[in-house]
Amino acid sequence: EIIMKNMHNDLGIIYESIEKVENILIIKEQLDAIKMGQEIMMKQHEIQAMQI
């Protein structure tokens, strides 16, 4: 009974940890996308500056 309860708690902690890691990965993807967007904008500004 106690062992099963401990295992259940451990699984809960593991699942919570996995969720946190998944959330971190999602945030990282979003930050990467923002960074790419910024780089594209910088390139567009450079191209516009060259055209003037």
Image: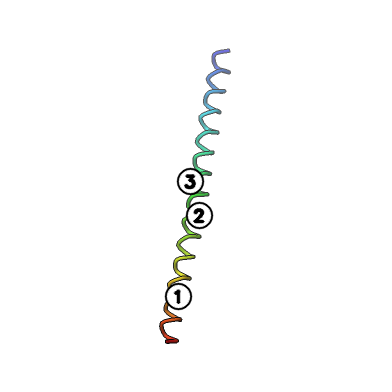
Q: Is residue 8 left or right of residue 31?
A: right
| 7 and 25: which is toward the camera | 25
Above/below status of 28 relative to 5: below
In the rendered image, which residue does mark 2 sit on? 30
State yes or no: discs 1 and 3 in contact (Cβ < 8 Å): no
In the rendered image, which residue does mark 1 sit on? 43
Q: Amino acid at mark 1?
A: Lys
Say which quadrant the C terminus sits in.
bottom left
Above/below status of 32 relative to 7: below
Residue 39: where, in percent of width, then height?
45, 69
Cα distance in 3D space between marks 1 and 3: 29 Å
Q: Residue at x 48, y 65 (%)?
A: 36
Q: Residue at x 51, y 29 (%)?
A: 13
Question: In front of the other: label 3 or label 2?
Answer: 2
State yes or no: discs 1 and 2 in contact (Cβ < 8 Å): no
Cα distance in 3D space between marks 1 and 2: 20 Å
In the rendered image, which residue does mark 3 sit on? 24
